[in-house]
Protein backbone atom coordinates (compact mmCIF):
# COMPACT_ATOMS: atom_id res chain seq x y z
CA UNK A 1 0.00 0.00 0.00
CA UNK A 2 1.51 3.34 -1.00
CA UNK A 3 1.59 6.46 1.13
CA UNK A 4 -1.03 9.15 0.61
CA UNK A 5 -2.03 12.27 2.52
CA UNK A 6 -2.32 11.33 6.17
CA UNK A 7 -5.90 10.52 7.16
CA UNK A 8 -6.76 11.64 10.69
CA UNK A 9 -9.74 10.11 12.48
CA UNK A 10 -10.98 12.71 14.95
CA UNK A 11 -12.92 12.01 18.14
CA UNK A 12 -14.52 15.08 19.71
CA UNK A 13 -15.68 15.36 23.32
CA UNK A 14 -17.56 18.42 24.57
CA UNK A 15 -17.30 18.40 28.36
CA UNK A 16 -18.41 21.95 29.23
CA UNK A 17 -21.25 24.27 28.27
CA UNK A 18 -20.94 27.37 26.12
CA UNK A 19 -19.07 25.90 23.15
CA UNK A 20 -20.46 26.19 19.61
CA UNK A 21 -22.50 23.14 18.56
CA UNK A 22 -20.63 19.93 17.87
CA UNK A 23 -21.06 20.14 14.08
CA UNK A 24 -19.35 23.56 14.05
CA UNK A 25 -16.56 22.35 16.34
CA UNK A 26 -16.06 19.33 14.09
CA UNK A 27 -15.84 21.59 11.02
CA UNK A 28 -13.28 23.89 12.67
CA UNK A 29 -11.14 21.03 13.96
CA UNK A 30 -11.16 19.17 10.63
CA UNK A 31 -10.25 22.34 8.77
CA UNK A 32 -7.27 22.98 11.08
CA UNK A 33 -6.11 19.35 10.98
CA UNK A 34 -6.32 19.17 7.17
CA UNK A 35 -4.34 22.42 6.87
CA UNK A 36 -1.58 21.12 9.17
CA UNK A 37 -1.42 17.81 7.26
CA UNK A 38 -1.15 19.73 3.96
CA UNK A 39 1.43 22.23 5.25
CA UNK A 40 3.68 19.50 6.61
CA UNK A 41 2.98 17.22 3.61
CA UNK A 42 2.26 14.37 6.03
CA UNK A 43 1.78 11.04 4.32
CA UNK A 44 0.97 7.57 5.52
CA UNK A 45 -0.69 4.47 4.18
CA UNK A 46 -2.41 4.07 7.55
CA UNK A 47 -4.72 6.53 9.31
CA UNK A 48 -4.01 7.99 12.73
CA UNK A 49 -6.35 9.06 15.53
CA UNK A 50 -6.71 12.37 17.34
CA UNK A 51 -8.83 13.20 20.37
CA UNK A 52 -10.02 16.78 20.89
CA UNK A 53 -11.71 17.74 24.16
CA UNK A 54 -13.59 20.99 24.64
CA UNK A 55 -13.68 21.86 28.32
CA UNK A 56 -13.57 24.84 30.68
CA UNK A 57 -11.01 26.74 32.73
CA UNK A 58 -11.57 24.69 35.88
CA UNK A 59 -10.89 21.36 34.14
CA UNK A 60 -7.88 22.59 32.19
CA UNK A 61 -6.47 24.24 35.32
CA UNK A 62 -6.53 20.86 37.07
CA UNK A 63 -4.81 19.19 34.10
CA UNK A 64 -2.24 21.99 33.86
CA UNK A 65 -1.45 21.64 37.57
CA UNK A 66 -1.21 17.84 37.40
CA UNK A 67 0.84 17.51 34.21
CA UNK A 68 2.80 20.77 33.97
CA UNK A 69 2.97 21.91 37.60
CA UNK A 70 1.22 25.18 36.72
CA UNK A 71 -1.84 25.83 38.85
CA UNK A 72 -3.64 28.11 36.40
CA UNK A 73 -5.87 27.73 33.38
CA UNK A 74 -4.34 27.78 29.92
CA UNK A 75 -5.81 27.87 26.43
CA UNK A 76 -4.64 24.50 25.08
CA UNK A 77 -2.83 21.41 26.30
CA UNK A 78 -1.51 18.56 24.19
CA UNK A 79 -0.96 15.01 25.39
CA UNK A 80 0.99 12.82 22.93
CA UNK A 81 -0.02 9.18 22.85
CA UNK A 82 3.50 8.01 22.06
CA UNK A 83 6.94 9.40 22.88
CA UNK A 84 8.48 11.55 20.20
CA UNK A 85 10.83 9.98 17.74
CA UNK A 86 10.74 7.99 14.60
CA UNK A 87 9.73 8.98 11.12
CA UNK A 88 6.36 7.24 10.99
CA UNK A 89 3.18 8.87 12.24
CA UNK A 90 1.89 6.75 15.13
CA UNK A 91 -1.54 5.09 15.04
CA UNK A 92 -2.73 7.53 17.72
CA UNK A 93 -1.41 11.10 17.82
CA UNK A 94 -2.83 11.90 21.24
CA UNK A 95 -5.23 14.43 22.71
CA UNK A 96 -5.74 18.17 22.51
CA UNK A 97 -7.68 19.83 25.33
CA UNK A 98 -9.08 23.36 24.95
CA UNK A 99 -10.55 25.75 27.55
CA UNK A 100 -13.48 27.89 26.41
CA UNK A 101 -13.22 30.81 28.85
CA UNK A 102 -9.50 31.35 28.24
CA UNK A 103 -9.91 31.15 24.48
CA UNK A 104 -12.83 33.60 24.56
CA UNK A 105 -10.88 35.99 26.80
CA UNK A 106 -7.76 35.88 24.61
CA UNK A 107 -9.74 36.34 21.39
CA UNK A 108 -11.52 39.38 22.85
CA UNK A 109 -8.25 40.81 24.22
CA UNK A 110 -6.53 40.41 20.84
CA UNK A 111 -9.58 41.60 18.88
CA UNK A 112 -9.89 38.48 16.75
CA UNK A 113 -12.82 36.20 15.97
CA UNK A 114 -13.28 33.29 18.37
CA UNK A 115 -13.26 30.74 15.53
CA UNK A 116 -9.92 32.08 14.22
CA UNK A 117 -8.33 31.78 17.66
CA UNK A 118 -9.81 28.32 18.21
CA UNK A 119 -8.54 27.16 14.80
CA UNK A 120 -5.09 28.53 15.65
CA UNK A 121 -5.02 26.68 18.97
CA UNK A 122 -6.11 23.38 17.39
CA UNK A 123 -3.27 23.75 14.87
CA UNK A 124 -0.89 24.71 17.69
CA UNK A 125 -1.91 21.68 19.75
CA UNK A 126 -1.56 19.36 16.76
CA UNK A 127 1.91 20.71 15.98
CA UNK A 128 2.91 19.87 19.57
CA UNK A 129 1.66 16.30 19.03
CA UNK A 130 3.78 16.15 15.89
CA UNK A 131 6.93 17.11 17.80
CA UNK A 132 7.00 20.90 17.51
CA UNK A 133 7.71 23.00 20.60
CA UNK A 134 8.49 26.57 21.63
CA UNK A 135 10.82 26.16 24.60
CA UNK A 136 13.73 27.88 22.83
CA UNK A 137 13.72 30.86 20.48
CA UNK A 138 14.68 28.64 17.52
CA UNK A 139 11.90 26.17 18.31
CA UNK A 140 9.39 29.00 18.72
CA UNK A 141 10.43 30.55 15.41
CA UNK A 142 10.00 27.21 13.60
CA UNK A 143 6.65 26.43 15.25
CA UNK A 144 5.22 29.93 14.79
CA UNK A 145 6.31 29.88 11.14
CA UNK A 146 4.40 26.64 10.62
CA UNK A 147 1.36 28.11 12.41
CA UNK A 148 1.48 31.25 10.24
CA UNK A 149 1.60 29.19 7.04
CA UNK A 150 -1.22 26.89 8.19
CA UNK A 151 -3.45 29.83 9.14
CA UNK A 152 -2.62 31.76 5.98
CA UNK A 153 -3.78 28.75 3.96
CA UNK A 154 -7.13 29.13 5.77
CA UNK A 155 -7.26 32.91 5.20
CA UNK A 156 -6.77 33.57 8.93
CA UNK A 157 -4.54 36.56 9.72
CA UNK A 158 -1.16 36.08 11.38
CA UNK A 159 -1.98 35.66 15.09
CA UNK A 160 1.42 36.94 16.15
CA UNK A 161 1.08 40.21 14.22
CA UNK A 162 -2.27 41.23 15.76
CA UNK A 163 -1.07 42.08 19.23
CA UNK A 164 1.63 44.19 20.78
CA UNK A 165 1.66 41.63 23.61
CA UNK A 166 5.27 40.36 23.90
CA UNK A 167 3.98 36.96 24.98
CA UNK A 168 1.63 35.48 22.35
CA UNK A 169 -1.51 33.78 23.61
CA UNK A 170 -0.14 30.31 22.83
CA UNK A 171 2.82 30.87 25.20
CA UNK A 172 0.88 32.13 28.22
Image (tube, helix red, strand yellow):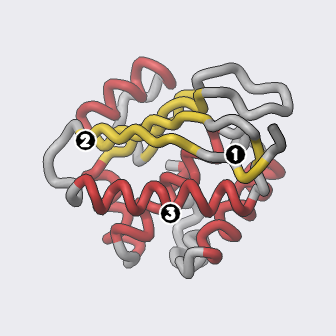
- Please tell me in which quadrant of the rendered image residue 98 appears: top left
Q: Which residue is disc 1 drawn over?
A: 134
- In three-dimensional space, the C-alpha distance between marks 3 and 1, rounded to whole angstroms, equals 23 Å
Residue 14: mark in rendering = 2
Task: Please tell me whether mark 3 sits on a helix, a strand or a loop.
Answer: helix
- In three-dimensional space, the C-alpha distance between marks 1 and 2, rounded to whole angstroms, equals 27 Å
Task: Please tell me whether mark 1 sits on a helix, a strand or a loop.
Answer: loop
Q: Position of residue 15 (x, y in %)?
A: 22, 36
Residue 31: mark in rendering = 3
Which residue is at a point 49% across and 55% down the rendered structure image?
Answer: 121
Q: Quadrant of the N terminus?
A: top right
Q: Of residues 162 and 88, which is closer to you in this image?
A: 88
Task: Please tell me whether mark 2 sits on a helix, a strand or a loop.
Answer: strand
Q: Position of residue 130 (x, y in %)?
A: 69, 40
Q: Of residues 43 and 33, which is closer to you in this image?
A: 43
Q: Residue furthest front?
A: 1
Report the number of discs: 3
The answer to whether residue 25 is left or right of residue 19 is: right
Q: Is residue 157 above or below residue 130?
A: below
Amino acid sequence: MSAKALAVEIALAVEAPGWPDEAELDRLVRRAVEAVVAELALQSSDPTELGVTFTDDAAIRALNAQWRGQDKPTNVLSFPAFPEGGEAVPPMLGDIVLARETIEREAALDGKPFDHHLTHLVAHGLLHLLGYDHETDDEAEEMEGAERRVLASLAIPDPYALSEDPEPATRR
